[in-house]
Image: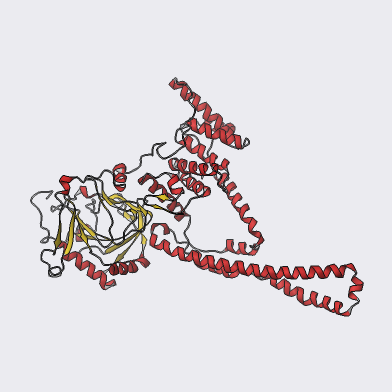
Amino acid sequence: MTACLPTGISDSSFIGNVLETLNIVGPTCNSVQKRTGVRVTARLRMKTFLSFKFWTLLVCCCWTTQAEIFTSISQMTDLIYTEKELVQSLREYIEAEETKLATVKSWASKLDALTRVSTSDPEGYLAHPVNAYKLMKRLNTEWSELETLVLQTPSDGFISNMSTHRQYFPDEEDETGAAKALMRLQDTYQLDSEAFSRGKLPGMHSNALLTVDDCFDMGKTAYNEADYYHAVLWLQQALKQLDTGEEAVVSKADILDYLSYSVYQMGDLPRAIELTRRLVAIDSSHQRAGGNLRYFERLLSKQLSEMNQEYQPASEEPIQLGTYSRPKDHLPEREAYEALCRGEGLQMNEARRSRLFCRYQDGYRNPHLLLKPMKEEDEWDSPHIVRYLDFLSHEEIEKIKALAKPRLARATVRDPKTGVLTTANYRVSKSAWLEAEDDPVIDRVNQRIQDLTGLTVDTAELLQVANYGVGGQYEPHYDFSRRPFDSSLKVDGNRLATFLNYMSDVEAGGATVFPDFGAAIRPRKGTAVFWYNLFKSGEGDYRTRHAACPVLVGSKWVSNKWIHERGQEFRRPCGLTEVD
């Protein structure tokens, strides 16, 4: 973390004076190291049963990590069983250490009693030949055996197990990604930090609680990203829980240090002053607090003088969701998109609902569907979006998931400037591509899509299977390409239509939403939705910009087939106008 100067200061000489005399900075990596030292000190108390060699081996083991685990719930489930195995291994290690220690204690007790007798009258003790023999034997043999016992390392098995599994552990990127996911869920579903901390999510209440240290680490993650909006929310929650008496490794001074500076960065000088005064009261020798306080007070006095206002003390209301405005970002329809994810702003009304119907679809008299047509429901009238019920069976879903899981990799997007595939924070999931040759079930699904839609899948893309991770999402995007010079368009044409299969139910969140016309489609296991991305003229239908809302609770599995233009010339002929 780099030191941060207050914003609005541009004169270099003044900056130098500030650094030298007032030391106006936010918490730096030094404060992080300080807290880490506290953690290490706490851990050292475990020395009564953890040998020095154990920790040396643990720290010195070299391994590689698998990043981006947080982007797939499916792959994260493997870690649950890995952790269970490690806990069992740890218990076995503890039992071995306790057995070893009990043996050493027994030796110590026996020898303590023996030496009390022998040292009271050494010559008299050794006058007995048996005692002389046993002394020779003890020092030559038995003490060597005790030395061998003490040198035994019961930790070897545990260390070996750790080394084997460590390569599959999440890394710092995963921890940061998971923290950002909680903040994304917090924003999208308007949940305060208290709700997360106490496990109170919509529709459920669990024992998954966040401690003071958890909340502080969340706030510090945001702080390191210069995301002071979320830093304030989580640091305030950490302070709130600490004030209630909850035990923690982090100190109140550390929390106030980060919180006061984050609040200052949000432009709330009165509250920043109040928090910094609390910090000075706790630690009058704090290296930054005094200088920051003087600077904040002088800056506020200057602002009030310029606006001809009197000083108003900071609000006594606690900081919570809505206290500060959330900064704008790259997404113009952010508010509309997130409102739809919450079930707000839906444009479904009685007039539109009256135009929606359900029917049996036989694929325009397709022989495969004549005896068993598919149940079809209208989800939206214009653009026309339909849902097919019972499109995939449970057995088919499980087989597709089993085929995809070993191949899951971080989902990518095409960079609009370079055309190169790359990962992006606005798409958090892992995906795999399955061919018809991989298994008969893939071939059957492809054929079923073709039968239902009347469109050939010969020029379609492979079946893409996706699993969404913690807060998994795909922000508003178009499925069709808006880059006419894409080389892929020259062969098979643009993405004419999207066929999306829902392969799991989702307890909360995870809807597919269309911000342009206010529609939200909820995942229902075994169903599929279908829509056209292009008009019959081949022009893109910009109304189909859609998004996958963040998964709040649950694991979301989907698969999709993107059907291209080539081969559809007689299956979906051109219309008379550009927007037919």
- Does residue 414 appear left or right of residue 168 in this picture? left
- Does residue 402 appear left or right of residue 87 in this picture? left
- Does residue 158 appear left or right of residue 321 in this picture? right
Q: Is residue 420 visible?
A: no
Tell me if residue 46 comes above or below residue 118 in the rendering: above
> What count of labels does the image hold?
0
Q: Position of residue 70 (x, y in %)?
A: 42, 57
Q: Position of residue 295 (x, y in %)?
A: 54, 30
Q: Position of residue 237 (x, y in %)?
A: 48, 43
**Residue drawn where x is 50% and y is 33% of the image:** 272
Q: Residue furthest top?
A: 308
Query: Which colour assignment does the render follow?
Result: secondary structure
**Residue drawn where x is 89% and y is 70% of the image:** 122
- Does residue 567 appear left or right of residue 136 in this picture? left
Choose top left, top right, bottom left or bottom right for residue 309: top left
Q: Is residue 140 visible?
A: yes
Q: Position of residue 37 (x, y in %)?
A: 61, 50
Q: Residue furthest left?
A: 576
Q: Nearer the viewer, residue 548 or 204?
A: 204
Q: Nearer the viewer, residue 468 or 191?
A: 191
